[in-house]
Amino acid sequence: MTGNSSLTERYVAAATRTIAPRQRDDIAAELRASIDDQIGALVAMGKPVEAAERSVLTDLGDPDRLAADYRESPTWLIGPSVYFEWRKLLKLLMWIVVPVAAFGVALGQTLAGATIGEVIGSTVVAMIGVIVHLGFWVTLVFAILEHSGARNAVPQTPWTLDRLPEPRESGATFPDMVGSLILVVLSAGALVWDRFIGFAPSHPGLPLLDPDLWPWWIAGLFAVMAGDAVLAILVYRRGRWTAATATANAALQTVAAVTAIWLLTQDRLINPDLWPTLITDGHAGEVASVMATITGFVIAGVAIWSIIDGFLKARRR
């Protein structure tokens, strides 16, 4: 046993996570029954239950390969001997390199004074280029290794039960709810602190946000934060994310992000006295422009990630 999940349940979860939702439950039940039968046979021969379970699961092998058999999907793009290593590396690079490249291009174009259309166009073109290059060069390297007889150069650690992943959190546990509520409380406290005390140690009372946002704009933000708190409680009570809760989360994040970015473009989000007070060498305007751009990207990035995360959790459930 590991944590609260048996090895069998962890193996079944890993083997069926890439199966189409309409087939996942049936295949999971079939696989679970097969494993139980094999364990029962070994136990009947006098083998301890835990040892029998480990033996059966080890014989089944890598759950990714078993899932491919269930899907009847080909694994020959590179060659069966390196296909899974190629796929894992390519997915990892796509998740890391593409967003970083997109952020860098968008930020650079914005700082260069490009229009919104030019920023979007340049970012999309850059993302497509990065995806194509990653796919081509990673595939080429693995193809050379496969066909040159150097496939042993690709790390292929034999699969063992120690590599079995823990089931993913559903995002609806009690710690998830508590964490969300604590974040809401801390955020509300930060807003009040900024208004009356400020975060600039050298200038007590100097707020980061425009004081004119009080009371109505800040009240609206408090309402969105209250909605986040209610949503966290609702998800916990229902025990899972659903399409409805993911949609509600997307609506809250969109309202907050669009409003904040609009205020930012109108020079009504950041305190207009902040940078002239902190920077007195004549470069306050340049710093304000750069920081406004970075702030806008951060706001949009956080909102987009939260929306995607909500729908992914709903889809996994």
Image (cartoon, rainbow, N blue to C red):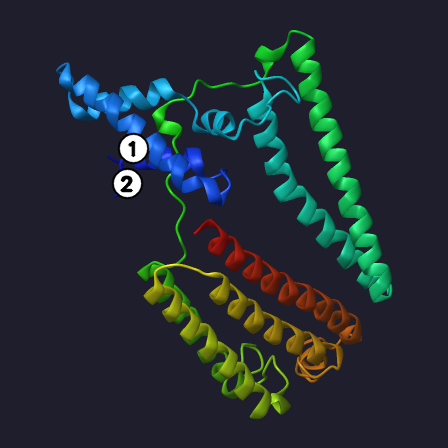
Looking at the image, which residue is at 58% across and 17% down? 80
Residue under pointer 2: 5
State left or right for residue 102 relative to residue 67. Answer: right
Looking at the image, which residue is at 74% across and 77% down? 280
Q: Say whether residue 205 is visible.
A: no
State left or right for residue 71 relative to residue 48. Answer: right
Q: Which quadrant of the figure contains the N terminus?
A: top left
The secondary element bearing badge 1 is classed as helix
Looking at the image, which residue is at 12% across and 15% down? 46
Badges 2 and 1: C-beta atoms under 8 Å apart?
yes
Q: Residues within 10 Å of mark 2 (few under 14, many from 20)?
A: few
Residue 251 falls in image quadrant: bottom right
The secondary element bearing badge 2 is classed as loop
Which of 152 and 113 lies nearest the eye of the viewer? 152
Q: Examine the rendered structure and indicate whether residue 27 appears above or below residue 204.
A: above
Label ID, residue 161: none
Q: Residue furthest top?
A: 149
Residue under pointer 1: 7
Q: Examine the rendered structure and indicate whether residue 157 appears above or below residue 197.
A: above
Q: Position of residue 3 (x, y in %)?
A: 26, 42
Q: Position of residue 102 (x, y in %)?
A: 73, 51
Which of 106 and 311 lies nearest the eye of the viewer? 311
Q: Position of residue 160 (x, y in %)?
A: 38, 22
State left or right for residue 196 relative to residue 147. Answer: left
Residue 202 falls in image quadrant: bottom right
Mark 2 to mark 1 CA distance (whole Å): 6 Å
Q: Amino acid at mark 1?
A: Leu
Which of 44 and 103 lies nearest the eye of the viewer? 44
